[in-house]
Image (spheres, rainbow, N blue to C red):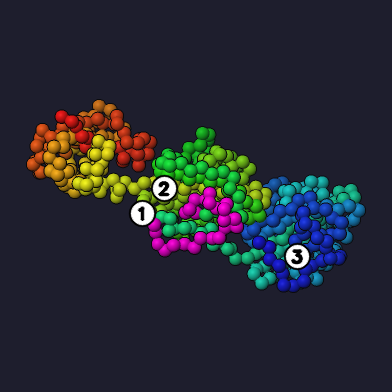
């Protein structure tokens, strides 16, 4: 936020009055009787200030630039019955008395043609235009070192008839604070734990995801949490023509979506804080884009809409940042997608967190007791530890722990009769999958008879291919869950 200077505040003519609705910058008061047309304040924003006369006959004009990043404040003041010269002299005197040094100055015709002057003013205007206020122009850029960084002031003063407008920019450079968003990695069962920021309103953050609290001061516009949902997240630049083509990450798991809004903070600062929090939490970036890398305004708005649970970011597609990151956790892989965009002094964060379910650990490990319990409770037991090479029906040696458990179950319960059913996903021809699943079921039965001495009459192999899926076949995770062997209790 804005810093108070240790030096005395600069006054223009006299001490400023207090304007609570549209405050002046604490460094530089308004010219007496001026009114505020537009006021913007953004925490840690990039801004480019012209530091020379504009050259060229048409846009884009060429000029020297000061590329700055810091706390940005812009004012568009209007006043009447005073000359642009008098306003200029007063601001210039105030800045120089305050110890500021001139970087660039131009007066009247030396600022360029009316088109160049109009564009020069627009480049520093909070409205991106000076409208008719480009006549009798004066422009100045001053800077001064301060405790935390350089302070730069730019002023464009122009008039129209008996009116004058002042376009004022103040940029206060300072180091980025990027510890405002903190991950609670204890939620993932990982170590070391992160420090969780204290929320401005403790009750409000109850609706945040426990892994990733909101940026301080953010308001929650919308939230949606769905247990075991499917979602596709873009992980590439969008193509050139509609419908836009792009690569996706197709995921299934517990899905949380949040739409946050906040004011007076740049999309850059938001992005750097979220990026730092994810990095500290051990996440790895899968894809990211920044500003123009994300595409033109149409592609950017579409990209944000793909992440937003309202399917739109509205006006908040400017100065965009997008990233997708993941991390392995105890229960499965966790994915985070963030689209950050802004409009004027507002910014919005579209957030997705998906917690996928681990297959390898949870589904492969079986024992006699778990199989017996599943049979008693549901009449069947799902097995993911009976392994085959792709499109083959030979049981792999790595399947032995699962085969040991099946044989142990049958020996513990000598009256138990089973159907051994083979299942595939829906990839490939239907009839081929039926035949493949039948061959795999037979292969399992043969191993149980040959290696463990199980009576053949107790086991009936059967293949059903893809017709009895455990979940959908629209993602790799879903397909993996559908490729399985099931033991089904039979009565005779």
Numbered label tally: 3
Q: Is residue 207 magenta?
A: yes
| Mark 1 lies on residue | 330
Contact flag, marks 3 and 1 (Cβ < 8 Å): no
Horizontally, is 252 left or right of 376 in the view? Answer: right
Of the two numbered discs 3 and 1 on the same chain, state the one appearing first in sequence. 3
Q: Quadrant of residue 386 in the image?
A: top left
Horizontally, is 32 left or right of 396 in the view? Answer: right
| Mark 3 lies on residue | 27
Name the quadrant of the C terminus.
top left
- Which of 349 and 166 lies nearest the eye of the viewer? 349
Q: Nearer the viewer, mark 3 or mark 1?
A: 1
| Mark 2 lies on residue | 355
- Magenta span: chief secondary structure: loop
Q: Tell me what residue is drawn at x 83 percent, y 61 percent.
A: 17
Question: In this picture, which residue range is highlighted in magenta?
Answer: 189-212
Q: Tell me what residue is drawn at x 77 percent, y 59 percent.
A: 24
Marks 1 and 2 sit apart, C-alpha to C-alpha, by: 11 Å
Q: Tell me what residue is drawn at x 68 percent, y 53 percent.
A: 62
Residue 68 in view: no
Residue 265 in percent (x, y) is at 63, 55
Residue 25 in percent (x, y) is at 75, 61
């Amino acid at each position: 936020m804005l810093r108070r200077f240790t030096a005395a505040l600069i006054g223009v003519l006299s001490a400023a009055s207090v304007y609570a609705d549209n405050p002046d910058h604490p460094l530089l008061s308004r010219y007496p009787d001026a009114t505020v047309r537009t006021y913007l304040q953004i925490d840690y924003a990039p801004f480019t200030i012209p530091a020379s006369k504009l050259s060229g006959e048409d846009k884009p004009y060429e000029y020297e630039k000061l590329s700055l990043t810091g706390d940005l404040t812009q004012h568009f003041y209007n006043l009447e019955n005073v000359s642009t010269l008098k306003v200029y002299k007063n601001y210039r005197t105030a800045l120089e008395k305050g110890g500021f040094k001139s970087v660039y100055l131009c007066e009247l015709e030396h600022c360029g043609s009316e088109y160049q002057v109009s564009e020069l003013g627009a480049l520093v205007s909070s409205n991106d235009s000076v409208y008719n206020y480009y006549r009798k122009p004066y422009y100045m850029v001053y800077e001064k070192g301060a405790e935390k960084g350089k302070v730069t002031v730019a002023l464009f003063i122009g008039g129209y008839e008996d009116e004058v407008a002042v376009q004022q920019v103040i940029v206060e450079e300072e180091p980025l604070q990027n510890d405002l968003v903190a991950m609670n990695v204890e939620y993932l069962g990982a170590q070391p734990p992160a420090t969780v920021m204290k929320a401005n309103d403790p009750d409000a953050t109850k609706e945040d995801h426990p892994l990733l609290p909101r940026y301080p001061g953010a308001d929650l516009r919308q939230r949606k949490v769905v247990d075991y949902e499917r979602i596709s997240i873009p992980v590439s630049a969008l193509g050139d023509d509609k419908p836009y083509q792009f690569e996706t990450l197709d995921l299934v798991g517990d899905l949380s979506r949040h739409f946050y809004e906040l004011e007076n903070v740049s999309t850059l600062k938001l992005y750097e804080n979220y990026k730092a929090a994810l990095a500290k939490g051990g996440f790895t970036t899968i894809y990211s884009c920044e500003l123009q890398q994300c595409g033109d305004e149409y592609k950017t708005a579409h990209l944000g809409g793909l992440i937003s649970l309202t399917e739109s970011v509205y006006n908040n597609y400017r100065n965009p940042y997008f990233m997708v990151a993941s991390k392995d956790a105890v229960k499965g892989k966790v994915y985070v997608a963030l689209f950050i965009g802004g409009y004027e002094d507002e910014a919005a964060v579209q957030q997705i967190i998906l917690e996928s379910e681990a297959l390898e650990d949870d589904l492969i490990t079986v024992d006699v007791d778990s199989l017996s319990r599943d049979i008693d409770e549901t009449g069947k037991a799902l097995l993911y530890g009976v392994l085959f090479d792709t499109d083959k029906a030979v049981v792999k040696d790595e399947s032995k722990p699962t085969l040991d458990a099946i044989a142990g179950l049958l020996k513990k319960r000598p009256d138990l009769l089973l159907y051994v059913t083979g299942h595939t996903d829906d990839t490939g021809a239907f009839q081929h999958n039926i035949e493949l699943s039948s061959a795999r079921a037979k292969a399992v039965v043969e191993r149980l008879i040959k290696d463990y001495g199980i009576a053949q009459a107790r086991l009936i192999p059967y293949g059903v291919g893809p017709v009895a899926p455990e979940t959908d076949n629209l993602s790799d995770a879903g397909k993996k869950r559908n490729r399985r062997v099931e033991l089904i209790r039979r009565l005779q």
